[in-house]
Amino acid sequence: MNEAEKEKAIRSIVRTAVQVYAEAFSTRHIVEKDNEDGVINMKIHNVFIAALGPEIQYYSALARSLDSSLGNMLEKMAINIAKLNYIVSQHVGGTLYKEQTDYIAELLEQYKRSENRRIPKLSDYQGISEKRGTAETKRHESDYYLVDEETEMHYLIELKIGGDLDNKKARSEKEALLEQYCILTNQLGEDNVKILFATAYNRYGEGKPWTQGRVRQFFCEEELCISRDFWNLVCKMGNGYDIVIDEYRQNAHYINEALNEIKDVYLPNRQ
């Protein structure tokens, strides 16, 4: 597939994803209008929001639903784009050694320390595939496990759409990535596997440094794959981000139309 064909395919995936999402989002909320367990209706009994008026009540509930469901759409869209360029899987399984899991546990504890905290570096886990001991077979679910057949590079990607890394889950998520890394490097060697923490957009502004403390506590600079870098990677094009954003903007009116349809049902006679 040449560059022009790839761009056309990427644009088609983005366009279809947005259109299908807009239709499903509208249909879901309109169907739920008289359902007390519907996403919007479940919020109407929050007296603290209700006191602010029906429009705030409506927009508050809808915004949360939009943010969550839009994130799910972007994740699926990225997977479909990645399939143009990579072998895509969402699990990793194989042999893991006790000495490796012990080393990972100690390393993560050092990242968590309130005093004398260890700053993450790629060198922290170089040589980990040489650590042996009692073997066990383990399987992990993965956000994205991409294999580039041309370069033989394997990417383990933890995707957070907006970059929010939960305080309670940060350690366990890096632990899972490191265990997957060990499973793969035990088979492939360490030069062929990369761990990446990715986001679909940069909450600090495109091109600006990613400074969120919780992420930087567990991931080093070389492991960050933020916004443009993520879309360029899954598209396997230097201008992948620009193509995705341009096509999304061209089709965003479908989502706006869906939002207006929902508003007409929940807030009739209001402009």
Image: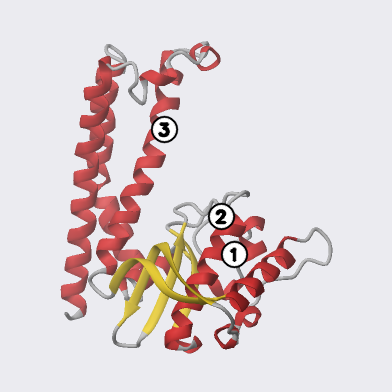
Q: Name the residue under label 1.
A: 209
Q: Mark 2 points at which residue?
A: 204
Q: Which residue lies furthest to the right in this view?
A: 115
Query: What whole-number distance in Å separates the C-alpha atoms at marks 1 and 2?
Result: 7 Å
Vertical position of residue 106 compared to residue 149: above or below: above
Amino acid carrying label 2: it is Tyr
Q: In the image, what residue occupies the spot 28% across and 75% down?
A: 86
How are the residues colored? secondary structure
User: Can you tell which of label 1 and label 3 is closer to the viewer?
Assistant: 3
Q: Is label 3 in a helix, a strand or a loop?
A: helix
Question: CB atoms at circles 1 and 2 under 8 Å apart?
Answer: yes
Q: Is label 1 in a helix, a strand or a loop?
A: loop
Q: Earlier in the sequence, mark 1 or mark 3?
A: 3
Amino acid carrying label 1: it is Pro
Residue 9 locus on image (x, y percent): 17, 67
In front here: 138 or 108?
A: 138
Report crowding for label 1: few under 14, some 14 to 19, many 20 or more residues within 10 A (C-alpha): few
Residue 135 locus on image (x, y percent): 52, 78
Residue 78 locus on image (x, y percent): 32, 61
Does residue 245 appear to the left or right of 132 in the view shown?
A: left
The reply to whether residue 139 is visible in this rendering is: yes
Does residue 129 appear to the left or right of 228 in the view shown?
A: right
User: Can you tell which of label 2 and label 3 is closer to the viewer?
Assistant: 3
Q: In the image, what residue occupies the spot 29% across and 64% down?
A: 243
In front here: 53 or 121?
A: 121
Residue 137 locus on image (x, y percent): 45, 72
Q: Earlier in the sequence, mark 2 or mark 3?
A: 3
Q: Is label 2 in a helix, a strand or a loop?
A: loop
